[in-house]
Amino acid sequence: MKKITALAIMLQLIMTCTLFAQFNVLHIDNNAAPQTKDGVFYSLPRTVVKVDVKIDRMENYKGPYADFALRLLGLKNVVAENTVDYKISSISITTYPEPDPDQYYFVELGEKVSKGESGILSLSDAGVILGTLPGNLDTTGRVMIVPKPEEPGAGTDKDAFGELFKYSADVSVFEKVDTIIRKINIDTMTVERQYYKRTMVEKSPEQKAKEAADFISKIKENRFNLISGTQEVNYNRETLEYMDNQLKTMEKEYLKLFTGISLHKSLNFSYKYIPTPNQINTEIPIFKFLKSKGVIDLDEPGGKVVTIKIQRVGNTNTVGNYLKKAIKDSKVQGFSYRIPELARISVKLDEETQEESQCLLSQLGVVTNLPANKWKVQFHKETGGIKGLEIH
């Protein structure tokens, strides 16, 4: 069942407030003084990095007659022992937004609120600001599917476990008949009497393998006779195909007794990572991988560590330096918005790069604000950056 995130369904909040009169937007933190004026809270989003890992699980089962495969059938490439192996088949990197707990704001409304002037302030259901532009709001839903790890044995071959080497359950005993001769002396005569002793003896593995190999040869012979028309029976096409498919299936099942069986399953895992400025250019462990176990926790012994690394491109450096030098001449400010930073994200297993991507990360960029009046603005819900702006 699809899991809907907090940002999935966008709501439009119609408010009786004026966006043309002057208002003030205050940044809220633990040190901010409580406000007694009317207003509304909103937040800017931060970017969450989601790493989806697909693991291939290979289960190899040795056939009961594998030791005789080369001598009886000439087969070399057979499963030699029961093993379970894992490997990373793919890693994908995606991002999605969530409210930033460090970027909450309070919109302090002006004195004209009570005079009936109206405006539109659009928020998501999580409180992330979407904009103030009526008729041009992004209300599309965002649905994120988080894959869950599959249970062992839940792959495409899940029904095969109960039928592994089903033809190995053929009759494994045979009747052994021993002739016993007894001599009986009566006076000067000797009489021989024969007795038959019947016992059931279990067949040896080699005997079973020989019978299975002979049956495979018989199946191949029957298929040849069927296709070549030796029976001189005018089968229709559907009947001929059905009989041939049944013989092929039976031959395949008997061959498994020699070659063994390999079962493939896919396991999916998801990891969430929130980049922070103090972890830039640092390899952060997210999980461990062990060939014999697959994905394991970081505190488990053994395994190779898989890390994630964030590198800034630096597209917001100029803006950040400019804002640090700029002098603010007003204590009243409008809506705060973000200029996201472009970053490279790489996931590595040891020193080998498994996946690399480039995307916008909101919390690594710059936060600034608009003037306090006469703006209509629309925000990108993923980054908190400005999408549209109407100037009066």
Image (tube, rainbow, N blue to C red):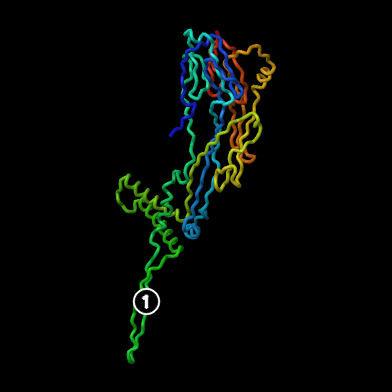
As rendered, which of 128 and 307 lies closer to the eye?
128
- Residue found at x 53% / y 13%: 109
* Callout 1 amino acid: Thr
Residue 125: percent from left, percent from top: 48, 24
Residue 282: percent from left, percent from top: 65, 34
In the displayed structure image, the side of residue 374 where residue 189 appears, left or right:
left
Q: Which residue is mark 1?
A: 179
As rendered, which of 139 and 234 lies closer to the eye?
139
Q: In this view, which residue lies farthest toward the right?
A: 325
Q: In this view, which residue lies farthest toward the bottom?
A: 188
Quadrant for the C terminus, please.
top right
As rendered, which of 66 and 236 lies closer to the eye?
66
**Quadrant housing residue 322:** top right
Q: How many numbered dots are placed on residues in this image? A: 1
Residue 360: percent from left, percent from top: 59, 25
As rendered, which of 182 and 293 lies closer to the eye?
293
- Residue found at x 55% / y 22%: 43
**Quadrant housing residue 369:** top right
- Residue found at x 59% / y 20%: 33
- Crowd rating for badge 1 (residues with CA inside 10 Å; few <14, some 14–19, many 20+): few
- Residue found at x 54% / y 19%: 379
Residue 283: percent from left, percent from top: 64, 36
Mark 1 lies on a secondary structure that is: strand
Q: Is residue 47 above or below residue 177?
A: above
Q: Is residue 300 above or below residue 205?
A: above
Quadrant for the N terminus, please.
top left
In the displayed structure image, the side of residue 17 where residue 354 appears, left or right:
right
